[in-house]
Image (spheres, rainbow, N blue to C red):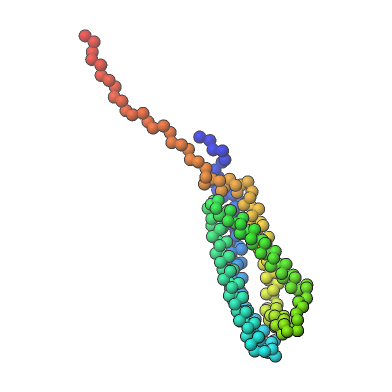
């Protein structure tokens, strides 16, 4: 029986590259989570030194916000890394559901990456205007960016760009014809079994002619 599509015996190069990109993004997400937890201690110390003249309760509130944001960011990055690694394994195994999930995650990830980059640019190009009553809080939040290491904020912007490009590349690779054949192979119908053998019938013994 002939099949409507050839069944590939080896993983197509497009799928292999998509797997590699997903795994690389997973490693980067986990590394970014760990780096965020490592730099928060020094960031808080530098922030407290720069805000030494501000009211203690406002400084403590900002520090608590810094710690909470670092933990939430780390947890989300770790979950993203685990998800991306699992999707890479599913894509490599030819699971159609994994490919659909990658497309959904890629759309959301590309949107979040663009939104994060736009926020990053907007915060530095548009001055923040506050009322007199919020002036102290505005000054404290302005010290946060200076408290982080000089490479931290550019790293975040670069990762936002890389994240967006990575999702777009993976989504495009998994839409190629070679990838379609790879994911279709699991649903290829098997050849139907042949007809059952005829039952054995012993030869009839005829009486001899007289």
Tell me, yes or no, if residue 101 can be seen here. Answer: yes
x, y (%) of residue 90? Answer: 54, 55
When the figure is inspected, residue 173 is found, relative to residue 123, above or below; the finding is above
Looking at the image, which residue sits at the far top? 210
Q: Residue at x 57, y 47 (%)?
A: 182
Q: Quadrant of residue 115?
A: bottom right
Q: Left or right of 51: which side holds 70?
A: left
When the figure is inspected, residue 119 is found, relative to residue 46, above or below; the finding is above
Looking at the image, which residue sits at the far bottom? 53
Query: Count the marks: how many?
Result: 0
Q: Residue at x 67, y 74 (%)?
A: 152
x, y (%) of residue 208? Answer: 23, 13
When the figure is inspected, residue 5 is found, relative to residue 131, above or below; the finding is above
Q: Residue at x 74, y 73 (%)?
A: 123
Q: Looking at this view, is 3 or 111 the one in front?
A: 111
x, y (%) of residue 147? Answer: 68, 81
In the rendered image, which quarter contains the C terminus? top left
x, y (%) of residue 49? Answer: 67, 88
Q: Quadrant of residue 47?
A: bottom right
Q: Left or right of 8: which side holds 154?
A: right
């Amino acid at each position: 029986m002939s099949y409507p599509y050839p069944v590939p015996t080896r993983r197509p190069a497009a799928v292999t590259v998509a797997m590699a990109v997903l795994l690389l993004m997973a490693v980067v997400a986990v590394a970014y989570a760990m780096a965020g937890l490592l730099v928060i201690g020094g960031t808080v110390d530098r922030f407290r030194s720069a805000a030494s003249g501000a009211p203690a309760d406002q400084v403590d509130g900002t520090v608590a916000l810094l710690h909470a944001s670092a933990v939430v960011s780390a947890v989300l990055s770790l979950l993203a890394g685990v998800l991306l690694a699992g999707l890479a394994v599913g894509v490599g195994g030819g699971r159609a559901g994994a490919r659909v999930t990658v497309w959904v995650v890629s759309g959301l990830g590309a949107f979040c990456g663009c939104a994060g980059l736009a926020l990053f640019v907007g915060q530095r190009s548009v001055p923040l205007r506050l009322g007199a009553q919020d002036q102290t809080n505005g000054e404290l939040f302005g010290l946060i960016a200076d408290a982080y290491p000089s490479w931290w904020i550019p790293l975040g912007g670069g990762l936002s760009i890389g994240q967006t490009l990575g999702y777009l590349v993976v989504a495009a690779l998994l839409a190629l014809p070679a990838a379609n054949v790879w994911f279709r192979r699991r649903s290829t119908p098997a050849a139907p079994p042949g007809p059952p053998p005829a039952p054995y019938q012993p030869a009839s013994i005829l009486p001899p002619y007289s």
